[in-house]
Image: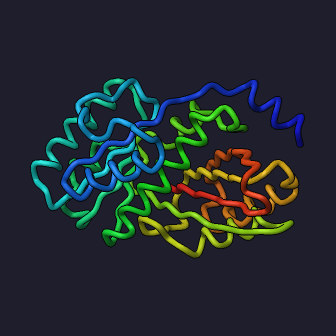
Amino acid sequence: MQQMLSDAQDENQAVKVKIVGFGSLAEAAVEQILRDTIPNAETNSETSHTDHAGLVIVAVETSDENGVNAACDFIRTAKAENALVFSVVFQGSEAAGCIKCGADAVFVASSEEAFAEALNALYRHMALFLENECVVSVNFSDLKAMFTDAGEAYLTVGFGKGPRGASLAARDAMTHATAGSFSPSFSSVFVGIVGNESIEILDFQRAIDVICEAVDEDAGIVWCFAADPETADAVRVIVVVA
């Protein structure tokens, strides 16, 4: 296992992740996430800049018309700079037409709680997988190829413990939606696993199999693993499907 982690680390380069919010609810959620994640971080004051991030996460409160228009402008800028753009929206998908047309993947949250939970899970996990040097077996080029212009998406996070922690977390994830409506016809799948380095390869395979059983048999899948020695025997699995 140690050799696999070392080899994978050598093959990957860090990719910056940026999160911004539009609308008072979205701005507050983003600022709270940044405060919790990065002490003394800049919050939402520079939303006009993508900071050359590879992945940009855009939170939008679609009941705020000015916020929606500003979000659409920002998404166009991010796409022009070749970023992959994920957007989490709240207050109904009907009001988010330009968001859906612009962002690569759009996650629709059904409540304020789900909106904040989806943003938190998406940003914290993707920043861990893409920015952290302990991330293994993730290729951002593959991720971008699969999710560019993917449309509506589904996000979920699961938890598990013990020798089969990864597969248990995968099953938990597939039964607890965080944002979006799941459809077996989705064809692009990202699976991120967080745990300590004692996880066995067989349990990785079981976790992937659990998710593959739920999606189209021809779906493309990208998975990665972030080693976190502080997690003891606990495992977290995040699933993004579009």
Query: Is 185 rendered above or below residue 103?
Result: below
Q: Is residue 10 left or right of residue 59?
A: right
Query: Is 35 rendered above or below residue 168?
Result: above
The location of residue 150, given as percent across then percent down, is: 43, 47
The location of residue 231, given as percent across then percent down, is: 72, 56
Q: Nearer the viewer, residue 226 or 188?
A: 226
Q: Nearer the viewer, residue 156 or 212?
A: 156
The location of residue 59, given as percent across then percent down, is: 31, 51
The location of residue 205, given as percent across then percent down, is: 81, 57
Labels in figure, total: 0
Q: Nearer the viewer, residue 233 or 68?
A: 233
Query: Is 15 rendered above or below residue 168?
Result: above
Q: Is residue 157 left or right of residue 67?
A: right
Work out which residue is located at the far front of the displayed protein and give it.
40
Q: Coloured how?
A: rainbow
Residue 236 falls in image quadrant: bottom right
Query: Is 129 rendered above or below residue 169?
Result: above
Q: Quadrant of the N terminus?
A: top right
Q: Residue at x 61, y 63 (%)?
A: 215
Q: Is residue 173 left or right of residue 230?
A: left
Q: Residue at x 34, y 35 (%)?
A: 42
Work out which residue is located at the far left of the displayed protein and give it.
66
Q: Residue at x 41, y 65 (%)?
A: 180
Q: Residue at x 89, y 34 (%)?
A: 3
Q: Nearer the viewer, residue 21 or 167?
A: 21
